[in-house]
Amino acid sequence: MIILTMAHANSNGTKLKVKKIKGRMTVLRVLSYNEHMIYVRFFSPDIFTYDLIHNNQLFSSYLVISPSSGRSKLSKTEITEAGKLVLMGAMSTVDSLIGVKLDDKELVRAAKVLNS
């Protein structure tokens, strides 16, 4: 059992809201992208995160994905697709940090990674 505490600012950035989650953590993907290791994780029941290191700094983000209407849990397909979405965010973060402008060849490469 993992207890995760997450804090995020509201829209004006002044107050932090803390959310404690009890659930299981699943590593969805670990891969190297432009010499950066990316870790995509799923914290049951609805939080997806990525972590990466750049110049000895941790970069992390998360998404909260709710199940389809009328369902209490995410389906395997929803978990897979949400993981891909978080991975795309991590890859975009790496590209932004290192100043890469993607050409058509790189876009095709990124699409292949996401579809694997």
Image (tube, rainbow, N blue to C red):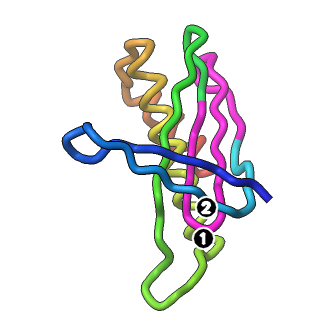
Going by the image, does 13 lie left or right of 39? left
Residue 62 place in picture, x, y as percent:
49, 46
Label 2 SS? helix
Residue 35 place in picture, x, y as percent:
63, 16
Along the viewing direction, whichever of 105 and 53 lies nearer the viewer: 53
In the rendered image, the residue lying farthest to the bottom is: 70
Whether the magenta-drawn stretch holds residue 104 is answered as no
Q: Residue at x 38, y 24 (%)?
A: 102
Above or below, 53 relative to 1 = above
Check disc 1 and report the residue beneath it.
77
Q: Which residues are magenta?
A: 30-51
Q: Would you say the residues marked 1 and 2 are in contact, meaning their CB atoms lie under 8 Å apart? A: yes
Above or below, 19 relative to 45 = above
Q: Residues within 10 Å of mark 2 (few under 14, many from 20)?
A: few
Q: Amino acid at mark 1?
A: Thr
Check disc 2 and report the residue beneath it.
80
Along the viewing direction, whichever of 54 and 12 lies nearer the viewer: 12
Q: Amino acid at mark 2?
A: Thr
Label at residue 86: none
Label 1 SS? helix
Q: Residue at x 37, y 43 (%)?
A: 16
Residue 85 place in picture, x, y as percent:
48, 51
To which quarter of the image does residue 92 belong?
top left
In the rendered image, the residue lying farthest to the top is: 55
